[in-house]
Image (tube, helix red, strand yellow):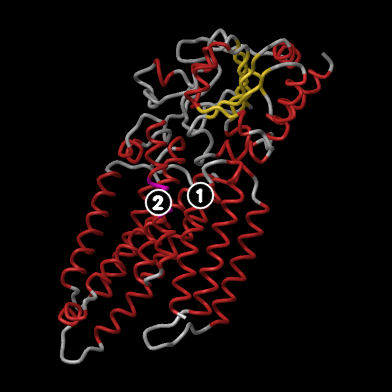
Amino acid sequence: MASILTLIYLIASITFIVGLKMLAHPARARKGNLIAAAGMAAAIAGTILLYEDDNGNGLQNHFWILGGLIIGAIAGTVAARKVKMTAMPEMVSMFNGMGGACAALISVVEFEHLMSSLHATPGLTVIESAFQSGLRTHLLIILAGLIIGSISFAGSMIAWGKLNGSIRDITFRGQHLFNIVVLLLVFLMFFYLVGWLPANGVLLFYTVLGLSLLYGVFFVMPIGGADMPVVISLLNSFTGVAAACGGFLYDNKAMLTGGILVGAAGTFLTILMCKAMNRSLLNVLIGSFGSDQKQSGGTNAHGTTYKEISLSDAAMVMNYAQKIIIVPGYGLAVAQAQHTCHELEKLLELKGVEVTYAIHPVAGRMPGHMNVLLAEADVSYDKLQEMEQANSEFPTTDVVLVLGANDVVNPAAKDDPSSPIYGMPILDVSLAKTVIVNKRSMKPGYAGIENALFFQPKTSMLFGDAKQVLQNLINELKEL
């Protein structure tokens, strides 16, 4: 049985690697997801049916195990099918938090088992028993899983609340110092427990749990909206590492491989996103970018006003353009306008216009948000241009249509050293001949800062809900 189960775990690990590789390209992403899911299903089924401990005993409580699987599968399926694209970032945060919570709960259960086995050793103190049984490493992994999983859970729940608007940024004087003190306390208790395992170890263990949850809350609380995609990616890597700790505890190769892959991929993605924003991870975590920068619109700081464009004029400009680049942002997701956008794209192409999309690495509120949004509308992946490619195309572009994007096209990142986004690479849409920006109003974007692009001579504002505006543009173009 053990050899068969090991083979199943090996196959599952291979499917995780293959699936992750296929996720690198949208055309293969769905199949890759299904392959990895099949491997996970095989690993779960193999564990339930074939697992045996050192005494030859299999898993007990099959009713509770299957009940949990059924309830979780139904809840996950319903939630995934009903979620709107605007709510996808907070769903990712919630699911990621559940993974962290599971890892933390595994550590709680295994710590109770560990303490029971140590106290059961006759004639030895707890610390002597731990030394002689070789369970010191076991305790270290338990605590690592507890701390990382708890931080991931608490942080992900705060991120979920901030993304759906139920939790606001909260900052106070000395907050970063408070976070550092809490984290130092967690580490001190961690090393004390691993090194000496005192008689009050259970109390300290649960104190570590409480402090880790507290740190997770205050770790994410001050981080501004524009940095949330980076935070989601970082917390995702935490969950992967916590899951890998569970794999070590149970000597489960599939769980270990999956956790390592998630942790490594999340870490790598976090680094790439920080690079895309030209900011260090430390700056993201302590910068509070976008948390308290709110400004009003209408005129900019120098008194310059913006100009509007009518639907008919916008349609006329686009009708006679030879090359148009569409820049999607969160506003497009809010309006659920991706399908209408694709319809506009097809209509323009029928008129002989070349249409592509420019995607900024941190557009939206989670990694790859715009790619997922446009893929749902069956927009060809070949039409999606990364930032570097798009920036080389803007100078020869007749019209750029910005749909709900804000901070990723803000020229202050290049021109204003006092701006909190100064130094962040942006989409240089101002290099195009004409820029049309669709927004509901002149309110700042998620980062909460004014966008100088809206006040430039080349830029015209087209106000309104993105879906309705795009539909009206389609109607106007059909009459030309």
Q: Are marks 2 and 1 in contact (CB under 8 Å)?
A: no
- Residue positioned 62% across, 28% down in the render: 383
208 is within the stretch colored magenta:
no
Type of amino acid at the residue the image marks with label 2? Ser
How far across and down, in percent of the image, does residue 322 sit? Answer: 67, 12
Residue 414's label in the rendered image is none
Residue in the foreground of this view, choosing between 170 and 439? 439
Per the picture, the main secondary structure of the magenta-coloured stretch is helix
Quarter residue 339 falls in: top right
Q: Nearer the viewer, mark 2 or mark 1?
A: 2
Residue at image x 60%, y 26%?
Answer: 357
Question: Which span of residues is magenta-colored?
Answer: 261-267
Within 10 Å of disc 1 (Cα), the crowding (few <14, some 14-19, many 20+) is: some
Q: Residue at x 32, y 35 (%)?
A: 280
Mark 2: secondary structure: helix
Residue 216 lies left or right of residue 16; in this view the side is: left
* Quadrant, the C terminus: top right
Query: Residue 161: which numbered mark, if any?
Result: 1
Residue located beneath label 2 in the image? 237
Q: CA distance from mark 2 to mark 1?
A: 20 Å
Identify whether 235 is placed above or below 378.
below
Q: Give whichever of 428, 458 is nearer the camera.
A: 428
SS type, badge 1: helix
Q: Position of residue 214 (x, y in %)?
A: 35, 57
Q: Residue furthest right?
A: 479
Residue 193's place in the image compared with 228, above or below, is below
* Residue with the most extreme bottom position: 122
* Residue 309 position in % (x across, y down): 68, 13
